[in-house]
Amino acid sequence: MAIPGVSGDEKQIAERIVHWLREAGCPTDAISFDSANTRTPLKGNVGNLIVRLPGTVPGPRRLLMAHMDTVPVCLGARPVVAGRFVKSGDPATGLGADDRAGCAVVLSTALEILRKGLAHPPLTFLFAIQEEVGLYGARFVKAADLGRPRLAFNFDGGAVEKVTIGATGGHRLDIRIKGVPSHAGVAPEKGVSAVAIASLAVASLVENGWHGLVTKNGKRGTSNVGVINAGSATNVVADAAALKAEARGHDAAFRNQIVKAIETAFQEASKRIRSVDGKTGRVTIEGRLDYEAFRLDDDEPCVVAAREAVLAVGLTPRLEISNGGLDANWMAANGIPTVTLGCGQMEIHTTQERLDLEAFEAACRVALALALG
């Protein structure tokens, strides 16, 4: 967790993982990096780290994975042990247990097998890049490079007994508003404020129930306008604004309704403000699907195996559906059904983040059981 590695800058942690693997006797030809980082919007310094081991006993190939990147608040973390928890010794930073604890669980499993020569089916260990900025490592990994595993297990945030079998889909929008500049004191009536257009649009979304938690006709989703950059000075009618928004939902059709509502609100707001000579603003919107929703069946082999492994360490598994995106979203889209388990991370993405060591150690036992089959 002390090794820096925000999204796009995972090379240092990848090199450390490779060092530990080689020390444990992992064959050089079992370790590879793909070129996912060359296809991501954020050009990173390393691709996904993939470790493929042939089986010593027959069985379907199993995959264990975690993502290497952390969010910016974790840069400079100084992990310290405080009783049964690990926390950051610097109160200004997060810890990075999301998802370095997951990396440690997957790595410790590989090391245990290599050092002790444990019998195992064919195995793949995936240390993914750029999860925090769009699930890009999992999005661009190739199933063939992974050996086309039949059972897959993703170790990420939360409690060990939480077995996540589905997650929402997410759509992002980049919104640009072009207004008309004018002197705000001398001739404000000659301008068209991009800030005013943005304000009217967001207000309309809130008033009509399309912002925040969105519930319509028994359907449920969420939306958020999360970033606004606009204007240059108080004495200038703002001629430009750039906003970032998102819509999420498990139902693709309803999520698309939310996206359409956002687009409509901004287009209509642009027509409501006119300069004294009849000019209006202009809105352009670029949207993209970040990840599609998925839901594994309760009897999917990876779900059954995960439940059994959690029970074996004395915990009661609970199946859950996530309202956030996971690497498992894109793994499923890539034809690899993947269940997600926690490692004891708490209050992630904050300076209060901590790692429950008892839960982490339980996750290590669960991961080893899943790898050995």
Image (cartoon, grey):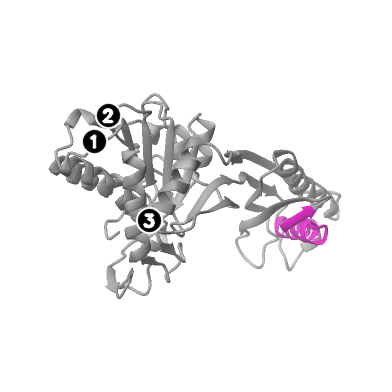
Residue beneath the point at 50% across and 42% down: 303
CA neighbours of label 1 inside 10 A, class few (<14), some (14 to 19), many (20+): some
**Which of 123/276 is in front?**
123
Alpha-carbon distance for marks 3 and 2? 24 Å
Indicate whether residue 196 is drawn in magenta.
Answer: yes
Residue beneath the point at 21% across and 45% down: 111
- Residue under label 2: 57
The quadrant of the rendering that contains the N terminus is bottom left
Callouts 3 and 2 close, C-beta under 8 Å = no
Q: Is residue 131 visible?
A: no
**In this rendering, would 284 be left or right of 19?**
right
On screen, residue 8 above or below 124: below
On screen, residue 196 above or below 85: above
Q: Amino acid at mark 3?
A: Val
Callouts 2 and 1 close, C-beta under 8 Å = yes
Residues drawn in magenta: 189-215
Q: What number is the disc on residue 119?
A: 1
